[in-house]
Image: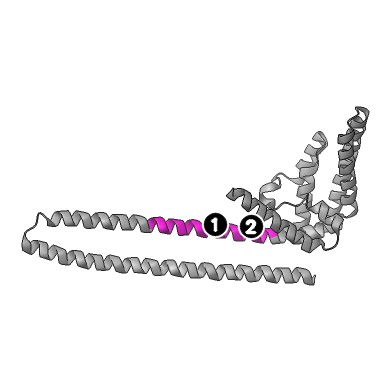
């Protein structure tokens, strides 16, 4: 259930950002809502674009190559013109492969499938015509997503560190309690004077333990304050980037 809620939250963030970037361009939004990845690092193939294009030629599926081309074009503004041509070329290859598949489906009477393939062809025509706009929006989208992914990774790392610190605190507390019980047992075997001196020593050790515990607690509070400061900076950064995007 928790995972589904997180996935829904991520999807809402994606759509909200796309709506902002696409404005009133509903066709561009509809296309990119099916082509942009919330987590491009995880979703987009690590293979070279040339390899993905070659594989697409063998299978007729150029989608991995298209995803890669849009992402790389978004991340390399100095090569934007080259990636526009790459995307248009991939669209042309996809249209050619899909037209053949559509013709076969029509001959076999698979009308629903043929209609679906027709919509795919229209999508590819749109991609070819609007390649520049697609890369421009993808650039802003992926820049923001990569920043958010970095923030999420650092937030997760801080969470793991807090968990480790809490576990260490529990472990130390258990060890100190075990030590007190052991010393208490030892005192039962001692004489009066020896026991009195041992009790004084125990009090000194307990006082030192309390001081160490308070020091660790203060360190934990400082970590929480730093966490709040970081989150506030991240929030400010998100608002500043949003304002900048609107300005553009």
**Residue at image location 88% in from the left, 55% down from the top:** 130
Span colored in magenta: 145-168
Q: Position of residue 209 (x, y in %)?
A: 28, 65
* In the displayed structure image, the side of residue 52 where residue 149 appears, left or right: left
What's the magenta bit mostly, secondary-structure-wise?
Answer: helix
Most extreme residue toward the top is: 108
Q: Position of residue 244 (x, y in %)?
A: 74, 71
What residue is shown with label 1?
A: 156
Q: Position of residue 7 (x, y in %)?
A: 65, 51
Residue 95 visible in the displayed image: yes
In the image, is residue 187 above or below residue 68?
below
**Residue at image location 77% in from the left, 63% down from the top:** 20
Q: Are marks 2 and 1 in contact (CB under 8 Å)?
A: no
In the image, is residue 82 above or below residue 54?
below
Q: Position of residue 33 (x, y in %)?
A: 78, 52
Quarter of the figure with residue 29? bottom right
What residue is shown with label 2?
A: 149
Helix, strand or loop at label 1? It is: helix
Helix, strand or loop at label 2? It is: helix
């Amino acid at each position: 259930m928790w995972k589904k809620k997180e996935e829904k939250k991520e999807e809402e963030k994606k759509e909200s950002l796309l709506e902002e970037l696409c404005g009133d361009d509903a066709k561009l939004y509809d296309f990119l809502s099916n082509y942009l990845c919330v987590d491009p690092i995880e979703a987009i193939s690590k293979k070279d674009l040339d390899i993905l294009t070659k594989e697409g030629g063998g299978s007729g599926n150029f989608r991995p190559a298209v995803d890669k081309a849009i992402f790389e074009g978004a991340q390399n503004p100095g090569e934007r013109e080259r990636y526009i041509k790459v995307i248009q070329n991939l669209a042309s290859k996809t249209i050619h492969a899909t037209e053949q598949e559509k013709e076969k489906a029509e001959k076999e009477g698979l009308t629903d499938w043929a209609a679906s393939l027709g919509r795919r062809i229209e999508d590819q025509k749109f991609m070819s015509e609007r390649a520049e706009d697609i890369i421009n929006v993808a650039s802003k989208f992926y820049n923001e997503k990569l920043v958010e992914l970095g923030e999420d990774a650092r937030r997760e790392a801080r969470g793991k560190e807090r968990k480790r610190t809490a576990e260490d605190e529990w472990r130390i507390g258990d060890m100190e309690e075990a030590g007190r019980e052991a010393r208490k047992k030892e005192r039962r075997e001692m004489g009066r004077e020896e026991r009195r001196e041992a009790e004084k020593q125990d009090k000194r050790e307990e006082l030192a333990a309390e001081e160490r515990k308070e020091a660790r607690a203060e360190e934990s509070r400082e970590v929480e304050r730093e966490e709040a400061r970081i989150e506030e900076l991240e929030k400010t950064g998100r608002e500043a980037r949003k304002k900048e995007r609107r300005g553009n």
